[in-house]
Amino acid sequence: MNLTTRLERLPVGKFHYKLLVATGLGWMFDAMDTGLIAFVLPALANAWGLTAAQMGIIGSAGLVGMALGAVVAGTAADRFGRKAVFSVTLLIYSIATGLCGLAWNYESLLVFRFFVGFGLGGELPVAATLMTEYAPPAVRGRFMVLLESFWGVGWLVAALMSYLFIPHYGWQAAFFIGAVPALYVFVIRLAIPESVRYLADKGKIEEANHIVARLEKEAGLTPVYTADPVAAGAANGQLAFRELWTPHFIKRTAMLWIVWFGIVYSYYGIFTWLPSLMVTQGYTMIKTFEYVLIMTLAQLPGYFSAAWLVDKVGRKATLASYLAGTALASYFFGQGGSSLTVLFWGSLISFFNLGAWGVIYTYTPELYPTRVRAFGSGWAAGVGRIGGVLAPVVVGYMIGGPDGFARIFTMFTITLVIIAAVVLALGEETKNKTLDEISK
């Protein structure tokens, strides 16, 4: 019985839920810092007299950092370990968020937002890889979507912070509070073990055996020490970009890059601008924050429903369905109407879009073997961030004119329909398969 077999035979227990919460809180802090800029932008526009284009560039600055951070951290995690890179990236974006509160002009804020994005973009694929490599096959999809659900909680925290603090204490206060997650690094160091699959792949069999044996004892199983052979080339840390485009992986990589680009483009284009877009429709800032807070709450049932479906129906069908649902809701949201109509369709955008995010974070690391799992996931996320860089700027230029609101959401509808079709055409099902089975 090898190490991965021993790891996968472990029943779902205290350790798995502890790991879920530990990585999930890091995810929540990520979302909180990301959400803050969406709520700060309207206040910044008033304070600094920013144009719509400048507001879009502020949103894109963080996405440029995220694109670079995802690739760099993904590469580093396959060489130096998931746990270390998770901690370092969390520290980078927390400190950079606090520095945003000290920004003295537009240019300095752009620099700080870049480093926020760098840390954030690096942390997400690494945390997803770590959780994927520990979750048992039968519940891996559910655990990954539940991990992503902490993003919804983080946005909810950002909305509450903005609603409670920005009107009374200014936009700087929100950023200063956003620096608090830096303290969480110390919790990570104590609560999260290194990935057993990573250790075995690097030839650190004794350390991997020690972790698995401890987990087996906690689960009431008898430890069976093993000496897994080191995978060829893994110990040298050889990561070849061209491997992602070999015949075995080309369809997977193409599908992931297209879907990541589209889902990030639509998400950041919609949610970075949502408070500002609603202000342009005549809502007051306080009323806008209230409505966006309600829409944010709709993310949570979106995650939980996707968490149930992803292991029952499968990754492919669930992802395509939730992308199509987001497309439909985006179209009708863009048509405007009464306050209740806008609130209804906006809530459905949150429900379906964030459910889709949960599935893509489940799906991506499953499609690559251990030696390039974080590397491949990081590149997919990095390419996706290019879409995130473009979207806020594109929306900033489209927002003018009497029909700008409708045109923006029609564009997102078309984007989402296309990537849903790509999933159906190129995706393969990974439900209930072990990671070793998928990577063959």
Image: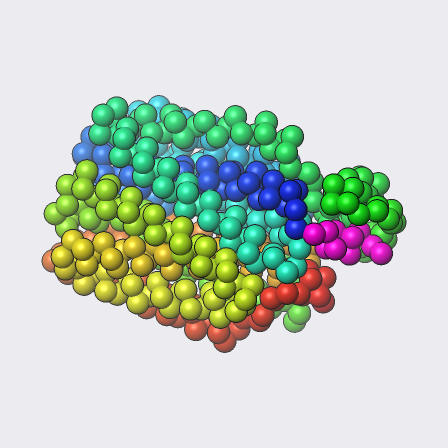
Res 83 → quadrant: top right
Q: Identify which residue, 180 or 40, lies in the foreground.
A: 180
Measured as percent of width and height from the top left, residue 163 is found at: 26, 34
Measured as percent of width and height from the top left, residue 93 is found at: 47, 34
Q: Which residue in the rendered view is the most extreme toward the bottom?
A: 425
Q: Which residue in the rendered view is the most extreme toward the front?
A: 220
Q: Work out which quarter of the rendered image holds the C terminus and state it.
A: bottom right
Question: Residue at point 80% right, 47% down?
Answer: 221
From the viewer's perspective, tell me whether residue 260 is left or right of residue 235: left
Q: Identify which residue, 104 or 127, lies in the foreground.
A: 127
Instruction: Note whether residue 427 is visible.
Output: yes
Question: Residue at point 40% right, 54% down?
Answer: 301
Measured as percent of width and height from the top left, residue 284 is found at: 15, 41
Res 303 → quadrant: bottom left
From the viewer's perspective, tell me whether residue 116 is left or right of residue 208: left
The magenta stretch spans residue 383: no
Residue range corresponding to the magenta coloring: 1-11
The magenta stretch spans residue 8: yes
Colouring mode (rainbow / by chain / secondary structure / one colour): rainbow
Q: Work out which quarter of the rendered image holds the N terminus and state it.
A: bottom right
Question: Residue at point 17% right, 45% down?
Answer: 279
Vertical order, 9 against 223 (above or below): below
Measured as percent of width and height from the top left, residue 323 is found at: 40, 65
Instruction: Note whether residue 376 is visible.
Output: no
